[in-house]
Image (tube, rainbow, N blue to C red):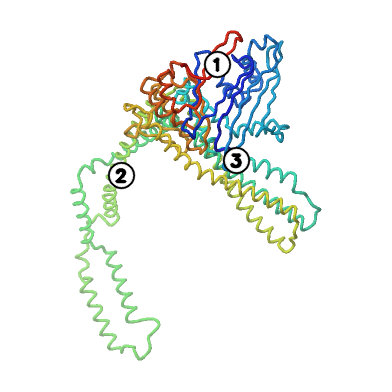
Amino acid sequence: MHWKHLSISRLELTNFKRFYGSHSIDLLSQPDLEKPLILIGGDNGRGKTSLHEAIYYSLYEDGDLPGIHTRPNYLRAVSDRLNRRALDEGKRDYSVAIEFIAKDIGAERQIRIERRWKANITERRVMDIELKIYENGRTVDWIEDNPLVYQDFLRSLLPPKIAPFFLFDGERIQEFADDDSRERKMVEAIEDILHINVYRLLREDLKRYVIDHLQRNEIKRHERDDFFELQAEKERIQNELENKRDRQSESDREIEELSRRQKQIEEELRRIASPHASERDELIQEKARLNGEADEIKQQIQEEFKPLSILLAGNSIRNALRRKIEQEQRAVTSAERLDELQNQMEEVKRRTFFPSPEPPPEILLSKKQANFYIQSFDESVKDVLGFDSREEKIQLHDIGDTKRRLLLERLINLEKHGCSLKQVIDRREHIYNELREVEIKLQSTSDDPYVEELLKENRGLTERIGALKEEQSNLKADIQRLEADLSTRSRQIEDRLSQRAATSQVRQIIKLAQEARRTLDDFIKQLAPEKLSLLQKYMDEMYSRLRKTEDPIRSVEIDAETWQVILKDERGRPLEKRVFSQGMKEMYALSLIWALAKASGRELPIVIDTPVGRLDTTNRRALFEKYLPSAGHQVIILSTDTEVDVEWAKRLAPFVARQYRLDYESNSDSIIIRPGYFF
C-alpha cells in the first residue's frame, strides 16, 4: 500500500557508528503551523552522515541499499558501522529503529521498524539480522514468517528507487546532472514514484499468481468421451489463443521498451558523435554501389555519343529532312499500289451492285438501272484515282517504301536519342552529387570505441525489433487461425455443452485476469503522458523560482518516450547538463525532486545532508528563501555552522519546528544529541 502522507516521527540508534549506547531524536515537523523544517547542526565528523545512514539502514537491506548488491556485501557494510567501543567492551546490542506516521484517506497509523544485528564479537562482524515491524504498537505478525513480504511492506512505505531523491547528500546531488547511469536511475524513479511500476507489477502478478497458477493447479482433466474431447480441445485452443495474445502484448511492450532504449542511444550518438555515425557501414556500401553505377553510366554515355554528329546538325535540319521524305512519300504512287487500289474498287463495286445473298425482288434494280449506276461508278473511279494516266504517275527512281520508312524511324529515334542522352548525363550528375554527400558523411563519422559500442547495441536493438515484428506477424496469423478453430469447436459442442461450475468459474477468473492485464496495458499508456506533463509543469515552475537571471535555461521538457529531462534555452535548443555550474546542477536536481513529490500526489519526508557545500551566495539565498520553506511538509536539514550559519538559522527560524546540535562527549567517547542549534 502506498500511503499518501508519510512523516518520520523518531529515529533511534544503538551502538551505530559514532553513537555509543542508545540515542533517540524526535523529528516530527509542524506543517499545520507552516514549520516544516528540522534543523540539525554539527561539525564535520560529528554524526550528521550517521543519522542519514541510520534512516537508510532502518528501511532497507541488501540490494535495496545504494551501492550494496549482495547479502555478503550488506553484512560487511553493517559490520563496518558497529560502534568500535561497544565491540571492544563485548556489547551485543546493535540496532537502528525508525518510526513513521502514515496517513491516507480516513486512516492514520504509527509504524515502527526495528533492525537488530547479531554480531560475532570475536570476529567483529555481523552474522544475522532481526527485523520487526510494529503498527500502532502491535507487532505486524501476519508477515513475520515471510521475509520477502516484510521487504515488500517496507518498499511500499518509501520505494528504494525513489529514496535517493528524498534522502540525499547535498554535496553529491549535482551528480544527477552528470552521470548517465544516474539519469537512467532517475527514469526508473520517475516510473516508480508516478506509480507506473505498480501497475506493471500488478500486470505481472496477475499472470504469475492467478493465470499461471490456476491453469497449472485448478483446471482438471476429465474422463474421455466425445464431449470432453471437444471441451478439452476448445480449452486447448482458448489457452493457446490467450497465450498468443499475451505474447503479442508482451512483444508490443518489448518493442516499445527497445525503441525507447534505441532512441536514448541515438540521442547519445547525436550528442557525442556525428549524426551519420550509425550509418557508417551502410555509407561504405552505398559508396561502392554508386561508384559501380557511375562506371556503368560512363560506358552508356560513350555508346550514346556515337550518333553525336547527326544530333549536332540541329533540330531544324533534321525536321526539314523528315518533311521532305514525308512529302515525297505522298507524291509517289507505285504500280503495286495502283493495282491494290484497283482491286479494292472492284471489291466495292461487286458488294454494291452484286450483293450476296440477292435482295428481295421489290427492292431489286432493273438491269437498265444497274448498268447506269455501274457505268457512273467506273467513270467516277477513273476520274478520282486517275487510272487512265497511271503510267505518268509512277516514278521509277524512288528510294522505296522500306528505305523511306527506315529513314523516318531513324530520324524519330534520333530525337528520342537526344532526350535519352540528356537523361543519362543528368543521372551521372545526380550520382556524382550523391557520391559527394556520402563521402562528406563518411568523413564526419567516428571510429571511437564507445561510439562503435553504441552502434553495435543499436544494430542489435534494430535486429531484435525486426525479429519481434516478424514474430508479431506470425502471431497475428496464428491468432486468426485459432479464432477460426475456436469458432468451429464452439459450434460442435453447442448442443452438448453442460454446466460444470468449478471449471467454468476458474476459466472465467482466468479470462477476467487476462482482460485485466490488457486493460492495465492500456491504462499505463494513457497514464504515463498525463503524469509526465504534470511532472514537467512542476519542475519548470520550481526551476523558474530558483534559477539565476543569467542562467541559459528557459524551459524544461520531458521526452514522452525516453522519460529524459531536457533543458532548453530561449531559442528552444537543448542544453547539456554536464557542462552546468555546480549551482545550476543543484538547482536542477532540487527542482526535479520537488516536482517528483508534487506529481506523485504523495507527501514524503525529505532529508538533506550538507545542503549548500558548493553553492555561491546567490544560489544559497535561493535555496534558503525559495526552496527549503516549500520543499515539503517535513524537511530534515543536516548542516555545519558554515552552511547554515547563525544568521541564516535565525532567518529560517519561523519555518523551523525543531533544532538539534550534535556534539562529541569525551567521557563516553560518543556523539550526543542536544536541543538547540549553534546558538
Label total for image: 3
What percent of the width, then of the height, locates residue 646?
42, 18
Q: Amino acid at mark 1?
A: Gly
Badge 2 marks a residue whose secondary structure is helix
Residue at far bottom of view: 362
Front of the two marks 1 and 2: 1
Q: Earlier in the sequence, mark 1 or mark 3?
A: 1
Badge 1 marks a residue whose secondary structure is loop
What percent of the width, then of the height, locates residue 215?
71, 46
Residue 343 versus residue 109: which sits nearer the camera?
A: 109
Residue 192 versus residue 446: which sits nearer the camera?
A: 192
Left of 286 or right of it: where is 168? right
Q: Are marks 2 and 3 in contact (CB under 8 Å)?
A: no
Left of 639 or right of it: where is 620? left
Residue 186 versus residue 484: which sits nearer the camera?
A: 186
Distance (Cα) linking label 1 and label 2: 87 Å
Residue under label 2: 420
**How many residues crowd around disc 3 within 10 Å: few (fewer than 14), some, or many (20 or more)?**
few
Q: Which mark is residue 47?
A: 1
What percent of the width, then of the height, locates residue 193?
53, 35
Q: Quadrant of residue 289?
A: top left
Residue at far right of view: 223
Left of 25 or right of it: where is 321? left
Badge 3 marks a residue whose secondary structure is strand
Q: Amino acid at mark 3?
A: Ala
Distance (Cα) linking label 2 and label 3: 85 Å
Residue under label 3: 107
Q: Amino acid at mark 2?
A: Ser
Front of the two marks 1 and 3: 3
Distance (Cα) linking label 1 and label 3: 35 Å
Question: The N terminus appears in which quarter of the rendering?
Answer: top right
Tell me: residue 104, above or below residue 646.
below
